[in-house]
Image (cartoon, grey):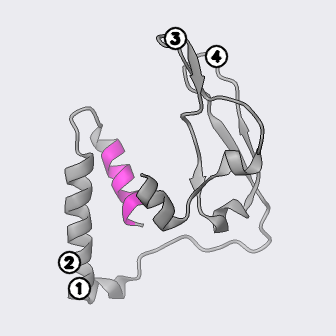
Amino acid sequence: FFEMDEELELVDAWRKLNPGVTQFTFYSNLHKSWSRLDMAWVNSNLLKEIQDIKILTNTWAGHKPLLITWKDRTHKKSRWTLNSQLLKEKGYIQKIREELIGFFKFNKKQDISLQNLWDTMNMYLR
């Protein structure tokens, strides 16, 4: 993860926008300890679009959710779509094939639902 973090220049949005604040998202009954397991990692472009980020309370589960409030945008950006011309390039197809093989080799575990695997793969390919 840390190699990917550096390569994509990701930052922990909550920590960046709440410097010096001590707050946690998970309590382990087994270890009797608090930690901040739940995070929102974004690049610098997305970080600029965040108006506020909060850790909410949660009484029915061990993890606390994060709430991100995005800045209003007067001009909406269009939804991401694949440039279909790329599918005509053999080198691009080969690169996608290699990425998918690596993705499934690393992520296809018995305890992961197919829906979760599919959703994660879609995000990974974008």
| Residue displayed at 19% across by 52% down | 105
Q: Are marks 4 and 1 in contact (CB under 8 Å)?
A: no
Q: Amino acid at mark 3?
A: Asn
Helix, strand, or loop for circle 4?
loop
Q: Residues within 10 Å of mark 4 (few under 14, many from 20)?
A: few
Q: Which residue is mark 3?
A: 29
* Res 97 → quadrant: bottom left
| Residue displayed at 23% across by 85% down | 91
Q: Are marks 1 and 3 in contact (CB under 8 Å)?
A: no
Left or right: residue 29 compared with residue 16: left
Q: Are marks 2 and 1 in contact (CB under 8 Å)?
A: yes
Q: Which of pointers 1 and 3 lies earlier in the amino acid sequence?
A: 3
Number of the label disc, if any, that sits on residue 94:
2
Q: Amino acid at mark 4?
A: Thr
Left or right: residue 89 compared with residue 67: left
* Res 74 → quadrant: bottom right
Q: Which of pointers 3 and 4 lies earlier in the amino acid sequence?
A: 3
CA–CA distance in space, label 2 to label 3 = 47 Å
| Residue 14 image point, x, y percent | 68, 45
Q: Which residue is mark 4?
A: 59
CA–CA distance in space, label 2 to label 4 = 48 Å
Q: Nearer the viewer, mark 2 or mark 3?
A: 3
Helix, strand, or loop for circle 1?
helix
| Residue 13 image point, x, y percent | 66, 51
Q: Is residue 96 magenta?
A: no
Number of the label disc, if any, that sits on residue 91:
1
Q: Are marks 3 and 4 in contact (CB under 8 Å)?
A: no
Q: Nearer the viewer, mark 1 or mark 3?
A: 3
Closest to the observer, 14 or 97: 14
Q: Which of pointers 2 and 3 lies earlier in the amino acid sequence?
A: 3
Q: Which of pointers 4 and 1 lies earlier in the amino acid sequence?
A: 4
Q: The C terminus is located in which quarter?
A: bottom left
